[in-house]
Image: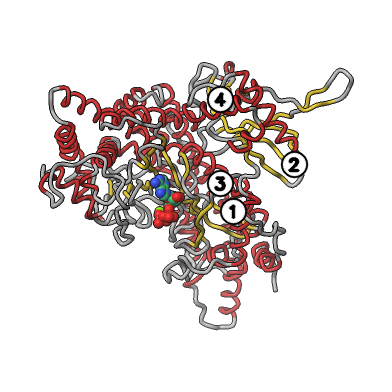
Amino acid sequence: MPSSPRLDAIQRTQQRPAAATAPAAPLQDIWAVDVFNLSKMKSSLPKEIFKSIQKTIKDGGKLDVSVANVVAQAMKDWAVSRGALYYAHVFYPLTNSTAEKHDGFISTQSDGSAICEFTGKVLVQGEPDGSSFPNGGIRSTFEARGYTAWDITSPAYLMATPNGVTLCIPTVFVSWTGEALDKKTPLLRSNAAMNKQAQRLLKLLGNSDVAPVNSSCGAEQEYFLVDSAFVSLRPDLLLSGRTLFGNPSAKGQQFDDHYFGAIPQRVQVFMQDVEQQMYRLGIPAKTRHNEVAPGQFEIAPFFEAANVATDHQQLTMTLLKNTARKHGMNCLLHEKPFEGINGSGKHVNWSVGNSTQGNLLDPGSSPEENMQFLLFCGAVIRGAHLYGPLLRAVVATAGNDHRLGANEAPPAIISVYLGSQLQEVYTMIKDGNLGSTDHGGLMQLGVDTLPEFPKDPGDRNRTSPFAFTGNRFEFRAVGSNQSVAGPLVAMNTILADSLEYMCNELEAKMGAGESLESAAASVLKAIMEAHGNVVFGGDGYSSEWHQMAVNERGLENLPTTADALLVLERDSVKDLFARMGVLTPVELQSRFEVYAEQYVLAVEVEAKLALQIARTQVYPAVMQYLGDLANSLRYQEDLGLPPDRAMAGRIATLNQELLANCTALESALASAPHGSAAHMRHCADGLLPLMHKIREAVDGLETLVDDKAWPLPTYQEMLFIR
Ligand code: ADP
Ligand code: MG
């Protein structure tokens, strides 16, 4: 049998030895063993010090240097006892990735010996330089120093590699002038802004004991697994994360036989490996299953405080990728690795609550009687309407553009799904009819301790980008490869803004003598009159909705990143972030520049890859085959057999299209305009359509050229061989 790298790869997948894994361990033996959490602090710190750090974690604020020194000592002793020689300040630059600066504990002594040393100062603040991280013009390189500072609400942990252990400290990353260069700083600020206004509202509602309000997040992560033998033969998957070419496999996802089917054994071994590592790091992995597309899976943890959940989500993505390699697979986190079958998203489940009032988005059994819930939920509705385009902007990436609006993921129009019961309640509020329900009277306070509002699983709408799901909102438009920080920042900030508006209105009305009940009812009525248009319970995938949303409801449809990112430059958005103290106009502008650049880079890398693969892999294979074909046709003619030139003709035609579009793409690449907005447009309208044309030619050729000569692993192989 003639051999080729591709056919060899298929063989290799079948001969792979099982990956070495640790045997299963009981949860209590592994849970959070690698985390320097409160319970480890409690057992290793003097009582007063522990109380002090516990208070700082709960109430926020700066860690006192004397406290930091003792904590640093204990943290180092713990890490060193576990074999750590290095520590790393871990931070989250604007690239959706995780960055680390590693430093040794080592300190040499005058007698030539060496000891491990770690002080409060280096625990609390590091100086990673980091001048090559994108900063959108905030820093010029001569003043490139950025600082990392421990976010003490997110515990330090140990990362183990086969021959080492590193103490990792989650940090914020700011410029020396205090500008946020990362994703964690605005998240903490947005939470503080939301907390401030939420407490204000809770107190207005008559609650005397009000604990700090925090946001929570549970992120469901979808991903694909592909055998590494195939990935190494696909430069597109390797460098851009998605297949730029590939004819659909004869069998796709039409049978729905993968969704929630039995997990293939090799995959389950991988999943268990990931989950055990997650447990060691205190990440509460909770669900695993097959997803809709062949080769696609999902993992979701139990929800946690948003800022810890965000760090844990980053860690989860890292663990998925690293562990997959160990098992001879690549974990693809790209939003659309394969055309023609479902892409991957990340559902971000989000709610706000505290220890005294509980989950503020829990309606209880009778939402119409629960004014507290109705106000908080109403605030989210107002925010999603006023700043819907912002919610679209925070999920705008080159990868996610292939998914949103493609009948498998929510549209690029932001609407809110409430479920029929709640939608009815808000309609009554809008019509001023709430007082006349069977339950009688105006909304009463404090009945949120009733049993749970029944969550009807049928009452779910998978086509909505932003859905209320019983006791939380689920932001479904987020891309699988994205950090959840941006979406959480946006949700916290628009909620803070709406709560502030509500509090101002309530205070004014009550100051003028209105009762709380009547003031709340009229504030909610006004909100629903102005913003009720964003509530939609129908099919978000339908073309009717696209028409109606834009023409009748006045909602915006921002189909590509080139459209959506411009929202970050709007005055209303600048004003929102500045007023809420989350991002200064300079910080926001820097984000626009960085995200625009990332979009442009992603598309241009893909364009270059498309050219490279089409010209240096596909074209030679086609020419070779066409040559063989031409020769045998000539032999047939010599023998007087009737030659069929149709096949050769089709191949030659497609080959010409391939070459012509490559030439066009090459010149388009060379003629990029200046300016972020224009450059993005050029990518969306100039490069991507040409890449699509090349793809059509290549995918057509794949169906005609000799399979043995085809250089790229096929969809069938990548999706079904495991
Ligand atoms: P489904 O797959 O049906 O959407 P799951 O049970 O998988 O639902 O839950 C999705 C995620 O939502 C999980 O991470 C879960 O912990 C999280 N979640 C549940 N309640 C809340 C809440 N109040 N706030 C934030 N996240 C929540
Ligand atoms: Mg979900």
What residue is disc 3 on? Answer: 283
Residue 9 falls left or right of residue 253: right
Disc 3 versus disc 4: nearer the observer: 4
Residue 216 lies left or right of residue 369; in this view the side is: right
Compared across the picture, whether 60 is left or right of 384 comes to right
C-alpha gap between disc 2 and disc 1: 20 Å
Q: Label 3: how many residues lie within 10 Å, few (<14), some (14-19) or many (20+)?
A: many
Question: Counting other residues with Cα less than 10 Å from the Cα at mark 2, is it few (<14), some (14-19), or many (20 or more)?
Answer: few
Q: Quadrant of residue 73?
A: top right
Q: Which residue is mark 4?
A: 52
Q: Nearer the viewer, mark 4 or mark 1?
A: 4
Q: Which residue is mark 2?
A: 164
Q: CA distance from mark 4 to mark 2?
A: 32 Å
The image quarter containing residue 10 is: bottom right
Q: Is mark 1 within 8 Å of ligand 1?
A: no
Task: Indicate which disc residue 574 carries.
Answer: none
Is there CB contact under 8 Å for labels 4 and 1?
no
Q: Disc 3 and disc 2: Cα gap in Å? A: 21 Å
User: Is 245 or 401 nearer to us in this picture?
Assistant: 401
Helix, strand, or loop for circle 1? helix
Check whether the beta carbons of the residues at disc 2 and disc 1 lie within 8 A of each other.
Answer: no
Q: Residue at x 19, y 37 (%)?
A: 524
Q: Secondary structure at mark 2?
A: strand
Mark nearer the N terminus (2 vs 1): 2
Tell me the element at label 3.
Answer: loop
Between disc 4 and disc 2, whose residue precedes?
Answer: 4
